[in-house]
Image (tube, rainbow, N blue to C red):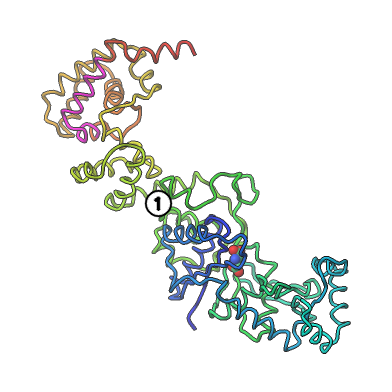
């Protein structure tokens, strides 16, 4: 039998990282076992479901690369089937009509139906109405809910994550399957849909653990095979509490706009609650598909660690070919600078080598774009701490060294190793460490204290632009343009 799994989000909000992780585990299992991954939008809560949330969920899955099989299903389209299933339970005596008006005392007890007392009263009330009487009242137009009659005994299942679980049925209230307004409840709709779609494995969050025995009882009552259940552990914030907005971004979309790569997000989500069984951390999706199994899903909750996500992203950035990164970086660049895509297309080879250079130290696509601006416009911004540290401690010496260097570089062949020989040679002649020459040079070329290797920066900028930037630094330092920085610092 083909394995069939599903992701069944309710479109009442954006795609949460917890939901994305559930989707991913289902997808990994399906792709690894030649199964099918079905998407079902559970939109029966009319008031809270919004088309824009459905859009956001579809977009999030798309961005993560979690492709589903066939068209997405919408739970609301199955309402007639859900009703028919509830009526069948009624016909077969496995459910009963509950006429209690929720606004009355008995009705309130039946509405809650959580404590022993409430359960007993609901059942007693139901038993006091004969099936004939019940039919007559219904035919007369009296409104009622349909309640499933929970049988005596125990309900157990072998959870693929938690092992054997068992619940005494006495602890389960007679659940409403069809409300007084004719709408199906969550437990009925899910069972009806999962059976209809031939779902073989239900993989979902731990928060559904208490629903599972109810759903198993419904499967049994309706005469359908019970699927395998796997409940994946919660995701926690760094303080050990359930992950929420308090901890920062919880929407998958936030990480997309922050420059996280889909591969890194997938890798990170996979490790939230699953382990490959060894120390491997950086994995592409093929490897994840090959290695994933429900047996290695952890029982314990795992902590959402943004630093780890950024680290993984850095690892994936370093492994991703520049031509795949290029459109992402370009999109970001256009947001933060006026650089046009025509301009970039005109210097394709150069632009790719720039990305190649920058991605090695970057943690996000945003990092790459932010750094790339330095090489794409000549409108340099000088970082204050960098200027103070590498120029203004001794502005006169800085000017002397930059001038000497400028003169030397004017005649050097503009090629990495020749540049390196020239610059290191100069530091030796001046009897200073290479850093004393390289740091001020870096600030003059990039405005920053950190950059890729200085010889790469020089070759990337080319002779004219590099010398021009050095000239600007020398002039500014002579005129005292940068001295304000120092004054401000003295005042502070
Ligand atoms: N729609 C439910 C939710 O979003 C999921 C139902 C299920 O996976 O069984 O929590």
Q: Quadrant of residue 8?
A: bottom right
Q: Is residue 125 left or right of residue 458?
A: right
Residue 12 sits above or below residue 452 on the image: below
Between 141 and 69, the one nearer to me in the picture: 141
Q: Quadrant of residue 344?
A: top left
Residue 412 sits above or below residue 107 on the image: above
Q: Is residue 435 left or right of residue 112?
A: left
Residue 346 sits above or below residue 274 on the image: above
Q: Position of residue 311 (x, y in %)?
A: 44, 45
* Secondary element at image label 1: loop
Between 253 and 203, the one nearer to me in the picture: 253
Residue occupying the point 36% across, 41% down: 335
Q: Which residues are magenta?
A: 457-475
Q: Position of residue 409 (x, y in %)?
A: 16, 24
Q: Quadrant of residue 466?
A: top left
Residue 57 sits above or below residue 420 on the image: below
Residue 292 seen: yes
Q: Is residue 122 left or right of residue 176?
A: right
Residue occupying the point 19% across, 34% down: 459
Q: Main secondary structure of the magenta part?
A: helix
Residue occupying the point 25% across, 45% down: 341
- Name of the residue lying farthest toward the front: 140
Residue denoted by label 1: 261
Residue 231 seen: no
Q: Position of residue 281 (x, y in %)?
A: 45, 54
Between 346 and 283, the one nearer to me in the picture: 346
Query: Quick check: is 471 in the magenta stretch?
Result: yes
Ligand 1: which quarter?
A: bottom right
Q: Position of residue 39 (x, y in %)?
A: 50, 69
Query: Quick check: is 88 in the magenta stretch?
Result: no
């Amino acid at each position: 039998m083909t394995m069939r799994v599903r992701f069944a989000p309710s479109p009442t909000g954006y795609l949460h990282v917890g939901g994305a992780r559930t989707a991913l585990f289902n997808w990994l299992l399906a792709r690894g076992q030649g199964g099918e991954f079905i998407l079902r939008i559970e939109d029966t809560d009319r008031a809270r479901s919004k088309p824009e949330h459905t859009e956001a969920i579809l977009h999030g899955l798309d961005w993560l690369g979690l492709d589903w099989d066939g068209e997405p299903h919408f739970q609301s389209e199955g309402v007639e089937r859900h009703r028919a299933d509830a009526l069948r339970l009624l016909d077969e005596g496995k459910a009963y009509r509950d006429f209690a008006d929720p606004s009355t005392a008995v009705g309130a007890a039946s509405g809650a139906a959580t404590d022993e007392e409430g359960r007993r009263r609901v059942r007693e009330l139901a038993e006091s109405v004969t099936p004939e009487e019940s039919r007559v009242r219904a035919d007369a137009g009296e409104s009622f809910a349909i309640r499933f009659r929970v049988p005596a005994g125990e309900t157990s299942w072998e959870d693929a994550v938690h092992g054997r679980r068992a619940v005494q049925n006495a602890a389960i209230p007679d659940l409403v399957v069809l409300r007084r307004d004719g709408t199906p409840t969550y437990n009925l709709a899910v069972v009806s849909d999962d059976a209809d779609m031939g779902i073989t494995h239900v993989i979902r969050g731990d928060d559904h653990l208490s629903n599972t025995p109810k759903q198993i009882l419904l499967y049994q009552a309706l005469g359908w095979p019970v699927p395998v259940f796997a409940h994946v552990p919660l995701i926690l914030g760094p303080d050990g509490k359930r992950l929420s907005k308090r901890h920062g971004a919880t929407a998958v979309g936030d990480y997309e706009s922050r420059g996280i790569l889909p591969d890194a997000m997938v890798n990170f989500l996979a490790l939230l609650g699953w382990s490959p069984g060894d120390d491997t951390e950086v994995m592409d999706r093929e490897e994840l598909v090959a290695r994933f199994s429900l047996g290695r899903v952890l029982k314990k909750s795992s902590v959402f660690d943004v630093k780890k996500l950024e680290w993984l992203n850095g690892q994936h950035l370093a492994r991703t070919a520049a031509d795949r990164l290029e459109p992402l970086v370009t999109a970001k660049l256009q947001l933060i600078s006026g650089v046009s895509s025509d301009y970039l297309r005109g210097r394709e080879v150069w632009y790719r080598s720039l990305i190649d250079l920058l991605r090695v130290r970057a943690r996000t696509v945003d990092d790459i774009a932010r750094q790339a601006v330095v090489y794409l416009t000549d409108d340099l911004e000088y970082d204050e701490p960098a200027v103070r540290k590498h120029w203004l401690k001794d502005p006169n010496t800085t000017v002397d060294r930059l001038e000497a260097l400028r003169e030397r570089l004017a005649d050097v062949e503009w090629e990495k190793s020749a540049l390196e020989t020239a610059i290191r040679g100069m530091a030796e002649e001046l009897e200073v460490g290479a850093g004393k020459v390289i740091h001020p040079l870096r600030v003059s070329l990039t405005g920053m204290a950190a950059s890729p290797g200085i010889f790469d920066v020089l070759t990337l900028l080319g002779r004219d632009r590099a010398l021009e930037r050095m000239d600007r630094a020398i002039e500014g330092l002579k005129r005292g343009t940068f001295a304000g920085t120092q004054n401000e610092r003295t005042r502070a």
